Image (tube, rainbow, N blue to C red):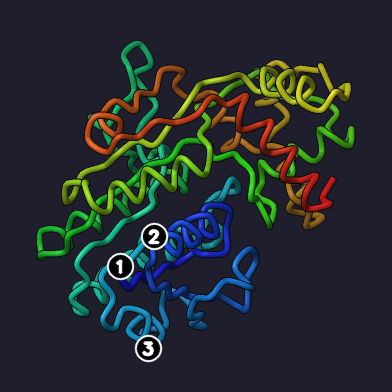
């Protein structure tokens, strides 16, 4: 049994992770930002109000802690957001890692993203040997790459930290719900008029959690582990969702060239009227991602074994139904 401190505990992955740690018998503390306890409100954990720059809250959470899981991040498909993406995904990582090292934390698991790596070239498989993104890439992607660099700096200073890089996360137990959670709900209710002709490498949040916990105990310091699953086009997900729910869903597939042409205007319109954009240059960039992402390293070193996407989709709708969210 360990004492574990978790940041970002109220997202999609966080509540699943906290439950797994409690099942393991751990004592769990969670950093709670702006009172957001989504998915963890009723769990027997210590909730510490604060953010990534609240040093007193971080020190309280890490005092005597054996393990830190750093999930908190700014996911953005609308650019740098006035520096907020860099502040949270780079400087926030630096502050949490610094206090973890000062607090004598034994293990540190940093949640990065597959987006931290360059997509090109696409004629060879995608694995952890890829070059990290740089300033020529999207702001979010570059920030996640910089976050990895920060973690490796602290590994050199003695922090036992490992890095996990999930793909496109889907799955049940999505209380918020996430961006993909809204997609599943919009498909079900016929609110999504069409999808873009693109695809991504998808992975179940429950498998990401299992991979991260394995990385805590088996991962090598400074190493990245791709926690990814199956590649599917978005229209394939629609067909699987139809099969699971028995509901007729959109079959409209917008060509990528047309979506890319419209995306800047759609983003401008959404920002002008303070709406969530349907798609942006960055989200479309993700859907043009590498079709052959390998998780061999995580499988060989961590025992990572992601489930089929079709199984995840079945569980997604079953869970939404149980929660009266359909």
Which is nearer the N-term, disc 3 or disc 1? 1
Q: Position of residue 131 (x, y in %)?
A: 26, 33
Q: Nearer the viewer, residue 318 or 141?
A: 318
Report the mark closest to the observer, 2 or 3. Answer: 2
Q: Residue at x 22, y 57 (%)?
A: 161
User: Which residue is most to the bottom?
Assistant: 56
Q: CA distance from mark 2 to mark 1?
A: 7 Å
Which is nearer the N-term, disc 2 or disc 3? 2
Q: CA distance from mark 2 to mark 3?
A: 28 Å
Q: Are marks 2 and 1 in contact (CB under 8 Å)?
A: yes
Residue that badge 2 annotates: 24
The image quadrant that residue 132 belongs to is top left
Q: Residue at x 41, y 85 (%)?
A: 57
The image quadrant that residue 304 belongs to is top left
User: Which residue is most to the top?
Assistant: 123
Label 3: which secondary element: helix
Q: Residue at x 74, y 44 (%)?
A: 182
Is residue 226 positioned above or below 76 on the image? above
Q: Residue at x 19, y 78 (%)?
A: 102
Placement of the C terminus among the 4 image quadrants? top right
Residue that badge 3 annotates: 56
Placement of the N terminus among the 4 image quadrants? bottom left
Which is nearer the N-term, disc 2 or disc 1? 1
Residue that badge 1 annotates: 1
- Determine crowd level at label 3: few under 14, some 14-19, many 20+ residues with C-alpha closer than 10 A: few
């Amino acid at each position: 049994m360990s004492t574990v401190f978790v940041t970002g505990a109220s997202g999609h992955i966080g509540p699943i992770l906290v439950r797994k740690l409690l099942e393991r018998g751990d004592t769990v503390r969670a950093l709670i930002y702006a009172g957001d306890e989504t998915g963890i409100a009723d769990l027997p954990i210590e909730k510490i109000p604060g953010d990534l720059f609240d040093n007193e809250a971080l020190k309280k959470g890490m005092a005597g802690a054996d393990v830190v899981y750093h999930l908190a991040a700014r996911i953005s498909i609308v650019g740098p957001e006035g520096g907020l993406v860099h502040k949270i995904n780079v400087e926030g990582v630096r502050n949490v890692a610094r206090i973890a090292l000062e607090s004598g934390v034994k293990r540190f698991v940093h949640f990065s993203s597959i987006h931290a790596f360059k997509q090109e070239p696409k004629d060879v498989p995608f694995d952890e040997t890829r070059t990290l993104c740089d300033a020529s890439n999207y702001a979010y992607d570059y920030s996640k790459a910089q976050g990895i660099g920060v973690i490796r700096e602290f590994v050199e200073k003695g922090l036992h930290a490992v890095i996990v890089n999930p793909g496109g996360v889907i799955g049940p137990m999505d209380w918020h719900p996430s961006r993909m959670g809204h997609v599943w709900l919009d498909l079900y209710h016929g609110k999504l008029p069409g999808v873009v002709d693109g695809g991504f490498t998808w992975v179940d949040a429950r498998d990401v959690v299992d991979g991260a916990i394995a990385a805590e105990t088996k991962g090598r310091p400074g190493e990245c582990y791709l926690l990814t699953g199956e590649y599917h086009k978005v229209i394939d997900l629609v067909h699987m969702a139809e099969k699971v729910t028995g509901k007729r869903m959109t079959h409209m597939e917008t060509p990528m060239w047309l979506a890319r042409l419209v995306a800047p205007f759609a983003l401008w319109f959404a920002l002008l009227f303070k709406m969530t954009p349907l798609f942006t240059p960055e989200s479309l960039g993700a859907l043009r991602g590498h079709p052959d992402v390998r998780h061999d390293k995580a499988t060989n070193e961590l025992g990572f074994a992601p489930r089929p996407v079709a199984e995840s989709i079945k569980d997604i709708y079953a869970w939404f139904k149980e929660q009266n969210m359909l």
